[in-house]
Every structure is written in structure tokens, then in C-alpha cells.
Image: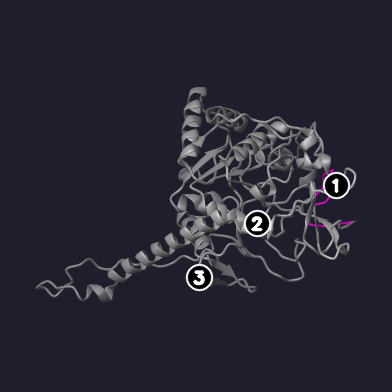
């Protein structure tokens, strides 16, 4: 399970803040907060849920940084007790609730850091989900890049070749010549481009982001919910431990995510469907000639409604920048010299304040790693990053709040990294981040 997967990762010392104390809201407080969350969802037009390892603990899969998490116990030389295999693990109430809410139209998208495949097993459609760190029950062809569902979990990590032929065929009906690889990220694996692009787009256009079972200690996934907040949306966090962005949250719920989702569905009048093994893609694929494909459909990038929302956000960002520029010009020293001076010869306006930009990529307070295109690295395409799977890791040094805010600003200004690691201004918002930054506090 989680510890077996963790043992397959490359060695890495700093795994973030582990074992932080858990906090529980009273039953009455939880009911009040869930009622508030239900109202937020009913009023929202685009709701995105972000899920971490905490949504799978009730399935018997340990988390990573909880009191009995894999990384927490690792520091003590211990391992968590496990009584279920990857193949036997079933979707939790939270997984099934999210699939039910999506089907009912209350949830537009789900972004997950988990590699356990439980969202897949729950029936959540591929075009409604980004899997940023991979999936144990999916393998991908290194030639045609198509993904296919597996009956059993892979035993490798780091996008390694499984020595299996691709079952795909071309337009002429000829078989693909590629080989299948796992899609589980190692510590130096690059995020899947399509999943990341869609995650960024949905996070930016959402007017409500809800985080479940994650301490948000890893980037870019940990910062995606704040994109919603930056553009006027609301942020809700449900987690037992404190998170990186609690101070930005409009609503913080400290209790078990299954309890929250059960009450939420009841208030919204949505019945949580039961797990049906006959509808589980991992149980159906390979039966007879049935091969289930898991590739992100191109229609995901041609959704007219989504593209219109993205367009409006870009216009809003452009107008905000223009307004800020005009304000800066108005308050510049040259413009103030044009003002009427007092008899003493001094400006009757205040002296101009010092201002500047803080480049996160160049900051000593923030770690940034360029995803390159060289031959070395942990990814299948030779790319590198300090991105960790499974609600992964944080860098060694803490950052200031100013650096954090500057980091988020850069994330929205299209800052791109060139092969030598020097940042260059990419202009408008770009939807495939080539710089992976790690939370530092």
C-alpha cells in the first residue's frame, strides 16, 4: 500500500511537516459549517474539489503526514499497519459522494494528488478529473501517449517500462509499436501536461474551490486552490491538521471528510451511490476483448463553456494590470513634479514610495526547479522537477509571506522557465507551468 509505494520512491530527506496535531470541531459546529458550504455550492457556478491522501484513509490506505502517516512513522523507524491491498481497496464515502455530486451537476471538476485509483473506481469520468501524480491502475504508451486501465496496480514507480505492448491501433488499423509504462511520479518526475493544464484552467475559473484531506504542502497542486481566491472566488478547506493556506480560507472545517460529504449530500438532496464492482473499470477492463481507455479526451480542451470562462478571466486580469499600471504612472515621481508646489518650494504631495518586483524563481527564500528537456531525469520524457507524488514534499527553508504572495503573482503572470533555469516573462497566463515550486512554510 502507501508504504510499499513510498519504498519505491527515490531517497529524499525533507518530506515536509509531519505529525502535526489534529483538531476536531464540535458536532454542532460541523453541522453549521456544512450548511454554509452547501449554500456556497448552490450559489456557485463552477465548483472544483481538490483531494489529498486524507480522503482515502477510511479505505485502509494510510496518509503521509498524519499522526500515523507513512512519513511521520518513517522518522521513528516505523511503518503503518495495513490490512488491505491496492487491488482490494474500495472507494470511500467521499469518493462516491464526489462522483454523485458531479453527476448531479454540483461539481464541475476534481483535482487529485492521489495515485490509489479510487476516483477511477468510484465512477468519476476522466474528462472531469486531473490526476496530477499518476494512477496505480493506469499505464501509458510511450509512443502514442494513450492511457489504458489495468486490472491490477502497477508495482513500479517513476514511469518505468512494463514490457507490455500497447493495445492501441492507428487510423489504418495497424497496431501501435509502443510499450506501456507506469505513470506514477517519482520525486523527480514531471507533472502530466494535459492534467496540469486542465487543473490550472478549472482552478482559475472556479468561483469555489474545496480542499479535502490535504495539507497543501506541495506545489503546484497546493497553490491551485488559491488561484480561485485570487480571482474573487471562495476557498473552503476540510482537514484535521492545519494547512498551508488556512489563513486564506473563507471556511475551515476540522473533522473527518466522510462526515462532511455525507452531511453535504444530504443537505443538497443528492443520494450517494454505492460502489458497484460491475461498474468498476479496473474490474471490467481486459474482460474478453474489452480494453478501457483512460486518455484525456481532446474535447476537454474544446469545452465552449470552459473556454468562455477562461476568456473572461483573462480579460479581468488584463484590466486589473492596466488599472495598476495607470495608478503607478499617476503616482510616479515625474507626474508628481507637475503638481503645484508650496511656497517653500517643496512638493505638496507625499514622496513616492519605493516599489519593486520580487522574482520567486530568483529568490533565496523560495525553491524553484526547471522542468528541462534533457536526457537525464526521472520522467519518461527525461524531464526533471522536485515534484513529489501523493501529497508530496516541501523544501528545506521557510519563506516569508511576501515571498509567498509574490510566488502566486508570478504563477498568474505567465512566468516561464528557459532551459538554463533563468526566468523569462511569458506575457499572458500560460496553462502549462514549466516551473515547479515547493511550499516552504
Q: Nearer the viewer, mark 3 or mark 2?
A: 2
> 147 or 335: nearer the eye?
147
Per the rendered image, the range of residues in magenta is 149-163
- Secondary structure beneath disc 1? loop
Residue linked to disc 2? 299
- Whole-angstrom CA distance, mark 2 to mark 1, is 23 Å
> 28 or 317: nearer the eye?
317
- Secondary structure beneath disc 2? helix
Is the residue under label 2 in contact with that under label 3 (CB below 8 Å)? no
Earlier-in-chain disc, 2 versus 1: 1
Local crowd size for mark 1, using a 10 Å CA cut-off: few (<14), some (14–19), many (≥20): few
- Secondary structure beneath disc 3? loop
Earlier-in-chain disc, 3 versus 2: 2
Residue linked to disc 1? 290
On the picture, is 6 further left or further right than 363? right
> 432 or 332: nearer the eye?
432
Amino acid at each position: 500500500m502507501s508504504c510499499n509505494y513510498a519504498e519505491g520512491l527515490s531517497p529524499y530527506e525533507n518530506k515536509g511537516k509531519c505529525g502535526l496535531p489534529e483538531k476536531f470541531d464540535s458536532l454542532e459546529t460541523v453541522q453549521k459549517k456544512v450548511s454554509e458550504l452547501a449554500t456556497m455550492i448552490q450559489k456557485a457556478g463552477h465548483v472544483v474539489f481538490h483531494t489529498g491522501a486524507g480522503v482515502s484513509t477510511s479505505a485502509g490506505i494510510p496518509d503521509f503526514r498524519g499522526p500515523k502517516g507513512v512519513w511521520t512513522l518513517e522518522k521513528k523507524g516505523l511503518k503503518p499497519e495495513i490490512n488491505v491491498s491496492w487491488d482490494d481497496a474500495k472507494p470511500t464515502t467521499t469518493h462516491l459522494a464526489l462522483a454523485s455530486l458531479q453527476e448531479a451537476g454540483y461539481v464541475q471538476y476534481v483535482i487529485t494528488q492521489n495515485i490509489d485509483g479510487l476516483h477511477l473506481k468510484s465512477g468519476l469520468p476522466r474528462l472531469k478529473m486531473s490526476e496530477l501524480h499518476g494512477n496505480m491502475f493506469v499505464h501509458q504508451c510511450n509512443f502514442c501517449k494513450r492511457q489504458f486501465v489495468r486490472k491490477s496496480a502497477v508495482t513500479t514507480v517513476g514511469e518505468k517500462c512494463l514490457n507490455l505492448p500497447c493495445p492501441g491501433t492507428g487510423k489504418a488499423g495497424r497496431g501501435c509499436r509502443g510499450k506501456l509504462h507506469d505513470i506514477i511520479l517519482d520525486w523527480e518526475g514531471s507533472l502530466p501536461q494535459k492534467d496540469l493544464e486542465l487543473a490550472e484552467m478549472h482552478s482559475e475559473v472556479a468561483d469555489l474551490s474545496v480542499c479535502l484531506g490535504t495539507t497543501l504542502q506541495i506545489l503546484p497542486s497546493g497553490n491551485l486552490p488559491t488561484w480561485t481566491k485570487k480571482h474573487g472566488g471562495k476557498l473552503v478547506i476540510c482537514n484535521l491538521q492545519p494547512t498551508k493556506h488556512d489563513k486564506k480560507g473563507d471556511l475551515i472545517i476540522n473533522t473527518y471528510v466522510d462526515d462532511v460529504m455525507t452531511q453535504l449530500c444530504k443537505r443538497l438532496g443528492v443520494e450517494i451511490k454505492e460502489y458497484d464492482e460491475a461498474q468498476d473499470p479496473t474490474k471490467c477492463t481486459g474482460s474478453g476483448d474489452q480494453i478501457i481507455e483512460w486518455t484525456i479526451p481532446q474535447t476537454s480542451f474544446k469545452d465552449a463553456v470552459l473556454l468562455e470562462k477562461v476568456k473572461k478571466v483573462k480579460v479581468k486580469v488584463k484590466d486589473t494590470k492596466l488599472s495598476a499600471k495607470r495608478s503607478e504612472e499617476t503616482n510616479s515621481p515625474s507626474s508628481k513634479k507637475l503638481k503645484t508646489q508650496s511656497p517653500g518650494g517643496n512638493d505638496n504631495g507625499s514622496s513616492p514610495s519605493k516599489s519593486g518586483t520580487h522574482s520567486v524563481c530568483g529568490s533565496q527564500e523560495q525553491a524553484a526547479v526547471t522542468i528541462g528537456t534533457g536526457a537525464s531525469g526521472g520522467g519518461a520524457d527525461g524531464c526533471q522537477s522536485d515534484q513529489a507524488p501523493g501529497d508530496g514534499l516541501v523544501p528545506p527553508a521557510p519563506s516569508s509571506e511576501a515571498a509567498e504572495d509574490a510566488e502566486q503573482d508570478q504563477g498568474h503572470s505567465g512566468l516561464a522557465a528557459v532551459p538554463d533555469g533563468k526566468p523569462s516573462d511569458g506575457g499572458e497566463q500560460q496553462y502549462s507551468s514549466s516551473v515547479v515550486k515547493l511550499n516552504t512554510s
